[in-house]
Amino acid sequence: MEIERKPALAHVAVACGVLVLAALSVWQASEIPPPVLQVAVGPAVAPWFITIFIAGCGVCLLFVALRGGWAREQDGTITEAGSLVSILLGLVVNVALIDSIGFILASSAMFPFVARAFGSRRPAYDAAVGFGIALASYVLFDRVLGYKIGSGLIENLI
Amino acid sequence: MDTFASLMEGFSIALTPINLLWALCGVTVGTAIGVLPGLGPGLTIALLLPITYKVEPTSAFILFAGIYYGAMYGGSTTSILINTPGESASIVTSIEGHKMARRGRAGAALATAAWGSFVAGTLGTLGITFLAHPVVEFALKFGPAEYFSLMILCFVTVSAVLGASTLRGLTALSLGLFFGLIGVDLQTGQARYHFGILELLDGISVLIVAVGLFAIGETLHLAATKKQEDDVIELDGPVGMTKEDWRRSWKPWLRGALFGFPIGAMPAGGAEIPTFLSYYTEKKLSKHADEFGNGAIEGVAGPEAANNASAAGVLVPLLTLGLPTSATAAIMLSAFTSYGINPGPQLLQTQGQLVWTLIASLFIGNVMLLVLNLPLVRVWVKLLKIPAPMMYAGILIFSTIGTYGISRSVMDLVLLYIVGFIGFLMRRFEFPTAPVIIGMILGPMAEQEFRRAMTISNGDMMIFLSKPISVGLLAIALLALIGPHVWSWFRRKEAAA
């Protein structure tokens, strides 16, 4: 006799996420117009095949999730939600600032948020370290290796 | 040209001062990122992909190969001194290595790991040298149908066979295939999967996906779960081996290399299987079986050798078939394409000099790595003392450079963070991430081969089943996919009866 198992809600959510991906794939695959020239395999063939593949994975995952979810090797419980939020805030700060004040200052602003998530409690010191690392890597990547990190308040001074 | 002459020509280019300098940079950076937990060769090479716009291909590949080999050496230092393997392939090393370090034998463990890596890395590179021509000879018989079937086999092995779960591996692969569809279709010029967003017309770069999954996802995962302080074992006493250590190490090195290289060279790739095989073999063969579990030197020597030999093995399908069997190999493959070099069996003919210089530089890199990792190991140990807040915040700065620093597009940064969050969820729900990278690189290539085959056959799907090599590869893929499940189903039935 098989034991009836309760659905694992988090796993159901993951499976639904995969099904959403499949839905996005249906949408985008159906937007592809038929090829103008006669070709053996048009540009929409692989997308439809991959769509079916994604949907198949999603359905199987949903099936497993409804029957108790998949076995886990580690306990993935989020114990440090605050740390996670802190990093996400840092990323938002970086995205919001980088175009206006430049890479170096935006990175210096992001640094304390990330450092905080890993247990640091000295935001001013962290921002200073972040500034140093950002400055050094700007010089290395932009000036030496030829990346184009763009301009900014500090970048314009160097 | 015969192998020896080609290799000598490769050495003549690899030994020029500028290329030696690139190799030195590569192995140094590689060792450093191998030592640092949380950074791997795939992420590092992805972040450095943009140098392909500026640096000539030979130098770039010497650098990448140095990073790739260096990370294997550096990873062992971390798994011996703190019990957190930096690389999945180093897990086995840490079993005995960390125990040895706890007993005050860190020096011997580090030495046997470094020498073992050197022996196996050199043997593995010799393996590449002598396998290159025969594999290419064979591969030149492949038509589009055979190639497509080979890629299907590769998809199955990297996603379904290697990981913990077939279904989750395949789901990760499907996400990669989805990413691979974004952008302009190479054959018809048709824009696909752009969601009306202008930036997506160029496709989504492997840099964004690799950095998102490996750097952002990993950082979020580590921050979200409970942290435990890793204590770094102090390295006192000399780094070296006694006569007894040498006597007990050399056979495991050779056996490890014998496990690692062929398994690494197979389309299944991966370093986990050979390192585990080596560990259990050494445990069985050892006269000191009682020491296993308490720090047996054979348990470090064998798996470390297997690890490095398999890293060399992975380069065989990459350089001869254009087939990436690990995430790092897939990222290196995208470097070839960004130079407009077509990877595949013709690589050895059209870019022979590049390939042989690369192989020569692997030999050179191994010697450099031995020097870097024996007398200088104490320098690397200092890296382990970088506080976690500084390190992960620093990784996020480098991630910004790798994306925004190329395109100056905030959209790319947002995309990076979205992929990073997906990576975090994948880590949390234990989906493998390597199939995503392999899927997005190999998917469009497989589509091209499929189309070529179908054009040849006038749209007849039977072409894949009418050629012996093709049908054989597909049969192996099917067997690898369902074989283990059928097997365990029968076992369960037997047990129930």
Image: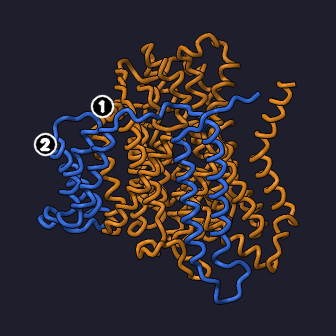
| Residue at image mark 2 | A124
Question: Could you tell me residue B130's position as x and y percent?
Answer: 69, 51
Q: Residue at x 75, y 61 (%)?
A: B149
State the hue of chain B.
orange
The quarter of the picture where the N terminus of chain B appears is bottom right
Query: Where, by quadrant of the figure, is residue B28 drawn?
Result: top left
Asked if badge 1 and badge 2 are on a common chain, one would say no
State the hue of chain A.
blue
| Residue at image mark 1 | B385
Which of the chains bears the disc numbered 2? A
Q: Residue at x 60, y 19 (%)?
A: B247
Compared with A10, B348 (above or below) is: below
Does B20 sit left or right of A104 as displayed? Answer: right
- Between A32 and B141, which is closer to the camera in this rendering? A32
Q: Residue at x 70, y 48 (%)?
A: B266
Disc 2, SS = helix
